Image (tube, helix red, strand yellow):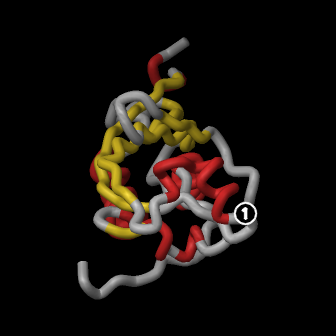
Amino acid sequence: MSQSHAQAYFGRRYTLSASHRLHTETLTAAQNRAAYGKCNNPYGHGHNYVVEILVGGRVNPETGMVVDLAGLDALVGAQILARFDRTNLNADPAFVERVPTTENLCCTIFALLKDGLPAGKLESVRIEETENNSFECCGVPWSRPAPENHREDK
């Protein structure tokens, strides 16, 4: 196989800090405590998330790359970091009707990025929430997330 037809993958890591409370109105207070434990704290809690984006595709014969790094950074900066970094995820429109678990955050990020890549195909989004917990989304079974809630204070 010639290099111009080679399939390759490019992974990029980003960090963001956000808080959330795991709670749903469809459960009683006791059921929420049972389901979410300390993560159901009424005051919420925060994480320093590591978000990994994996893009696959053909290696561009001119640039030797799968995806333009600057273009990917710009997309993630505008669609993900500007929206979620230093926020309370419960206040984001994407989580009005779904609990802001890291599973749901991972799928939301996948949905926000999948159609906007400068090249290649979004293969997966992986999030490390803690040193013991990680989550991965390779596709989104539900509709796109709610539009961005523009914040003037950033």
Relative to 60, 30 lies left or right: right
Of residue 1 and residue 88, the one placed in the foreground of this image is 88
Q: Position of residue 120 (x, y in %)?
A: 51, 42
Q: Residue at x 55, y 37 (%)?
A: 136
Q: Where is residue 115 in the image (x, y as percent from the top left)?
A: 58, 58
Q: Residue at x 51, y 21 (%)?
A: 6
Relative to 61, 5 lies left or right: right
Q: Residue at x 41, y 32 (%)?
A: 10
Q: Quadrant of residue 80?
A: bottom left
User: Hey, which residue is sitting farthest top in the picture?
Assistant: 1
Q: Quadrant of the C terminus?
A: bottom left
Label 1: element kind: loop
Of residue 133 and residue 147, the one placed in the foreground of this image is 133
Q: Which residue type carries mark 1?
A: Leu
Residue, disc 1 = 27
Q: Quadrant of the N terminus?
A: top right
Q: Is residue 114 visible?
A: no
Relative to 45, 95 lies left or right: right
Against 51, residue 64 (above or below) is: above
User: Hey, which residue is sitting farthest left in the picture?
Assistant: 154
Against 144, residue 128 (above or below) is: above
Of residue 122 and residue 59, the one placed in the foreground of this image is 122
